C-alpha cells in the first residue's frame, strides 16, 4: 500500500474510533426519558404538574433524578418544583423535594409527578423544566427539557400552552449512523487496496 493510502486509512480509522467512542458514551446509560405536561395551569395559586417516565436498560446504584424550573421573564422567586409522587406513591409534604432516588417501580420503570404552584402576581410567558438523571458521582446520564409557553398570559389573556421536547436523545442515533457509514467506507478502502495489491502481484 502506498504511503498516502496508509495515511488515508489511518485517518478514517481514527475518525471511526472517535465516533464509536462518542456513540458508546451517548448510549451507555441506555435510557428512555419522557417529560410531559400532565395538568397545567397559569392561574396564580394553582398547581401545574408534569409527568416523568424513565425506562433504562439497566439500573445503576445511587442514581438520582433532579428537576429544576426557570421562567421567562425571570422571577425573583419562581417557587418550588418538587416530586409529589414517585412510582405511584404520594410523597408527604415534608419529603417533597426537587430530587428523587432512581429506583424502578413495579413495572420496571421509574415514574414520577412533579408539581409547581404558580406564584401570585407573576407574569411570565415561558416556564421551562429541566430534568437530569445523574449517577452516584453527579455525572449526567440523561437530560430532558419541557418548555411551556403562554404568549397571552403576560397580557392577562387566556393562556395557551405547548411543550417542546429535548432533541438530545436523537443525537446518539445520528452518531451511530455516522459510525456505520465510516466503517463501511473504511472497509471499502481496505478491500480496494487488497484487490489492487493482488492485481499487481499477479
Image (tube, rainbow, N blue to C red):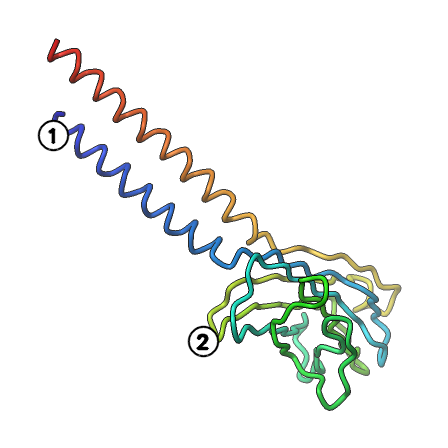
* Residue 99 x, y percent position in the rendering: 63, 78
Residue 28 screen position, x and y as percent: 47, 57
In the image, taking residue 40 as reference, residue 36 lies left or right, namely left
Q: What number is the disc on residue 137? A: 2
Upstream in the sequence, badge 1 or badge 2? Answer: 1
Of the 4 image quadrants, the one containing the C terminus is top left
Query: In x, y percent, where is residue 15?
Result: 31, 42
* Residue 148 horizontal/vertical position (percent): 73, 63
Most extreme residue toward the bottom is 94
Residue 82: quarter of image: bottom right
**Helix, strand or loop at mark 2:** loop
Q: Nearer the viewer, residue 45 or 143?
A: 143
Question: Which residue is tagged 1?
Answer: 3
Q: Is residue 132 left or right of residue 180?
A: right
**Label 1 vs label 2, nearer the camera:** 2
Residue at (50% x, 71% y) in the render: 135
Amino acid at each position: 500500500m502506498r504511503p498516502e493510502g496508509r495515511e488515508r486509512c489511518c485517518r478514517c480509522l481514527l475518525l471511526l474510533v472517535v465516533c464509536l467512542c462518542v456513540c458508546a458514551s451517548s448510549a451507555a446509560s441506555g435510557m428512555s426519558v419522557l417529560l410531559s405536561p400532565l395538568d397545567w395551569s397559569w392561574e396564580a395559586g394553582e398547581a401545574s404538574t408534569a409527568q416523568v417516565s424513565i425506562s433504562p436498560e439497566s439500573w445503576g446504584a445511587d442514581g438520582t433524578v433532579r428537576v429544576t424550573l426557570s421562567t421567562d421573564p425571570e422571577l425573583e422567586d419562581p417557587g418550588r418544583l418538587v416530586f409529589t409522587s414517585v412510582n405511584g406513591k404520594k410523597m408527604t409534604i415534608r419529603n417533597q423535594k426537587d430530587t428523587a432516588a432512581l429506583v424502578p417501580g413495579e413495572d420496571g420503570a421509574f415514574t414520577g409527578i412533579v408539581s409547581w404552584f404558580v406564584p401570585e402576581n407573576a407574569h411570565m410567558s415561558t416556564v421551562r423544566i429541566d430534568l437530569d438523571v445523574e449517577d452516584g458521582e453527579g455525572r449526567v446520564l440523561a437530560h430532558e427539557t419541557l418548555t411551556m409557553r403562554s404568549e397571552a398570559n403576560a397580557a392577562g389573556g387566556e393562556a395557551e400552552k405547548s411543550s417542546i421536547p429535548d432533541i438530545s436523545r436523537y443525537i446518539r442515533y445520528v452518531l451511530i449512523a455516522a459510525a456505520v457509514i465510516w466503517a463501511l467506507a473504511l472497509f471499502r478502502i481496505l478491500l480496494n487496496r487488497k484487490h489492487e495489491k493482488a492485481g499487481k502481484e499477479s
